[in-house]
Amino acid sequence: MPTEAPSPEKLIDMYTRMWRIRQFEEQAEYQSSQGKVLGALHTYIGEEAVGVGVCSHLHDTDYITSTHRGHGHCISKGADINRMMAELFGRATGYCKGKGGSMHIADFDVGMLGANGIVAGGFGLATGAGLAAQLRGSGQVAVCFFGDGAANRGPFHENINIGGVWKLPVVYVCENNGYAQWTAQADITLVTDISSMSAAYGIPGVQVDGMDVMAVHEAAGEAIDRARAGEGPTLLECKTYRFHGHNYGDPQQYRTREEIADWADNNDPIKRFSAHLQETGVLTEAQDEAIQQQVADSIQAAVQFAESSPYPTPDELYKDVYSYDIA
């Protein structure tokens, strides 16, 4: 059953979030080049339509789990960009008090259960969150974002299997950008359409253009509604593309500049969404410029917040690491 068309206000909010992701990531890369961002950095530039299209249906009480490329998921779910930027800068005001960095941001207040650096590391968390929601009868939904490379690991199969058997309220969202780190997907698997794997577990498999936020929004809405109604998981595959390297500093010797330019010039999800909104009368050029400026101002404010925040003190070293009872 098709989902209800989003209101103009909702569409503008989605568009703004896509720009917030894009500009946050661009600023994060710049700050990394200046030596201010600590640790590894994996940007979401080019994939904004997936996170925003999916999370546009979720409530703060719903859950998501993320990947090493998690900034876009955080922003899509409503995380505070000030605390995100502070975390990248290693400051005490960051989400993990400056001790986690880019790959470990979490915000339980908005249902963001965390990014992590382990490929396929989010499956168990999302499936467990879905089980907890089912047992409580709360009507909550959990969404597991993962990359195409994770489909070759055990947690993908184990969790989708049990999610299907128990009809858990989970949506498994594959962000298939065609590359597992530095290796083309076609070089490591004969099955390049992840959604087709759903048949082995008796759940629906849906594939959409992950560069089209409206296509993602519609497909995700149906999958989330199905999960919320107690009908079990869906495997949603979004064919997308990252415009920048696997991580900051990646020389990208595994793909051509022409390939990257073709995707960026002809399939930019923000440009496509902007054209759609202007064609349908939802957005004017003046509004577009105002949105981009408002986002730019907020990103600069986030940088200033991070730079003015203190580093964690030495006594934080052993906090939040583990706990034990010596009695």
Image (cartoon, rainbow, N blue to C red):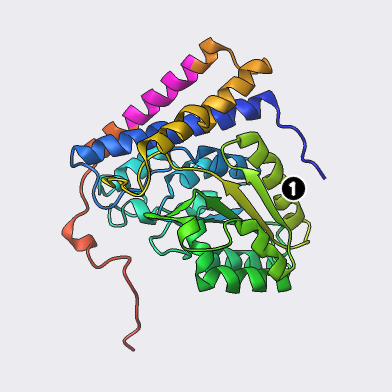
- Element at badge 1? helix
x 46%, y 59%: residue: 187
Q: Quadrant of residue 172?
A: bottom right
Vertical order, 291 against 88 (above or below): above
Residue 192 horizontal side relative to residue 246, left or right: right
Which region shows up in magenta? 289-301
Within the image, what quadrant is residue 126 found in? bottom right
The amino acid type, in three-letter code, at marker 1 is Glu
Q: Residue at x 38, y 24 (%)?
A: 296
Residue lying at the far top in this picture: please name it. Answer: 286
* Residue 243 point in image, percent of width and height: 41, 38
Q: Is residue 92 visible?
A: yes
Which quadrant of the rendered structure holds the N terminus? top right
Assess whether residue 118 is covered by the magenta stretch. no
Q: Is residue 287 above or below residue 115?
A: above
Q: Is residue 122 visible?
A: no
Give the residue at mark 1: 222
Q: Is 298 within the magenta?
A: yes
Which is nearer the eye, 165 or 95? 165
* Residue 27 x, y percent position in the rendering: 32, 33
